[in-house]
């Protein structure tokens, strides 16, 4: 077991390299002042959220934005980003313009993902409840349970498998579940669900702490993502040894509604 924990600089450097695989650019592109527009590619080491390339995806770490997009969008994007600081592209008035353009090609923007990296040490945790770790083979038994939509995937996904889960137990009943998927070899994403009747007792943050510590012990880097308006999830991240690190978004196809005669 690899128990060495990278320092903050090493974690950030690893993130930039991972995003370079995801956005088909160079790691140093995320340090630039000017916005970068690239072509999408199915790089082998990318985080696999789709079997196809995204029509558009966009990320910002500090100042600029890196946008990976279909060639058809490049002329419009080149004009759209002119004179704009990259992180402001994620504000609503700019999103309206981008979404209108995407709709011309049958696409729309999805949620904006606010992403967190861990502080580079194990964090203290002393749960006042029984808990249990389970791994891939046992996790298979929990797919399809609607009370855990964030902790694990809806089904086993070999391209980004759920590799580790920790359960909070009240006797035989599961109070909460935190799980991490190996989105890439190095980056494992943590998700959390706590049943409504058990919320407000610190179960969520305790589970996330347990899972992030164990992820570090296994030589991977834990990371965490949530949406802008999910304040409960933000509070868990901040209470569990994570700090805001980057923002990303992507497009999806517009589903056509079929009307029955």
Image (spheres, rainbow, N blue to C red):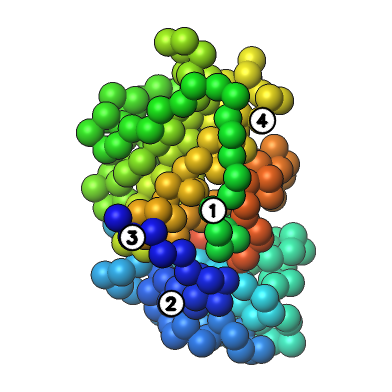
Q: Is mark 3 on a helix, strand or loop?
A: loop
Earlier sequence position, callout 2 versus callout 1: 2
Cβ–Cβ below 8 Å for labels 4 and 3? no
Give the number of the disc on residue 202: 4
Give the number of the disc on residue 122: 1
Residue that badge 2 annotates = 17
Residue that badge 3 annotates = 2
Q: Is residue 227 visible?
A: no
Residue at image position (45%, 73%) is 14
Badge 1 local density, few (<14 within 10 Å), some, or many (20+)?
some
Q: Residue 228: x and y, percent? A: 69, 50
Q: Residue 156: x and y, percent? A: 28, 38
Q: What element carries label 1?
A: loop
Q: In this view, does 254 lie above or below 72?
A: above
Which image quadrant for residue 103? bottom right
Spatial separation of the CA atoms under disc 4 and disc 1? 18 Å
Q: Which of 168 and 19 is in front in this view?
A: 168
């Amino acid at each position: 077991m690899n128990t060495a924990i990278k320092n903050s600089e090493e974690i950030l450097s690893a993130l930039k390299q991972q995003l370079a695989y995801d956005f088909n650019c160079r790691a140093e592109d995320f340090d630039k002042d000017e916005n970068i527009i690239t072509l999408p590619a199915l790089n082998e080491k990318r985080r696999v959220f789709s079997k196809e390339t995204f029509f558009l995806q966009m990320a910002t770490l500090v100042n600029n934005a890196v946008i990976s997009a279909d060639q058809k969008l490049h002329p419009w994007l080149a004009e759209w980003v002119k004179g704009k600081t990259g992180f402001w592209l994620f504000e609503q008035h700019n999103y309206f313009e981008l979404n209108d353009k995407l709709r011309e090609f049958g696409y729309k923007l999805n949620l904006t993902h606010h992403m967190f990296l861990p502080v580079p040490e194990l964090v203290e945790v002393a749960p006042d409840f029984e808990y249990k770790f389970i791994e891939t083979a046992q996790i298979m038994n929990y797919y399809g349970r609607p009370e855990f939509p964030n902790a694990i995937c809806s089904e086993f996904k070999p391209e980004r498998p759920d590799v580790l889960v920790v359960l909070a137990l009240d006797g035989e009943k599961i109070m909460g579940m935190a799980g991490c998927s190996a989105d890439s070899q190095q980056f494992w994403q943590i998700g959390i669900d706590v049943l409504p009747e058990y919320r407000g007792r610190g179960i969520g943050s305790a589970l996330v702490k347990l899972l992030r510590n164990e992820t570090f012990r296994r030589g991977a880097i834990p990371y965490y993502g949530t949406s802008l308006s999910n304040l409960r999830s933000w509070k868990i991240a901040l209470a569990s040894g994570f700090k805001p690190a980057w923002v990303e978004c992507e497009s999806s196809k517009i589903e056509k509604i079929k009307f029955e005669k």
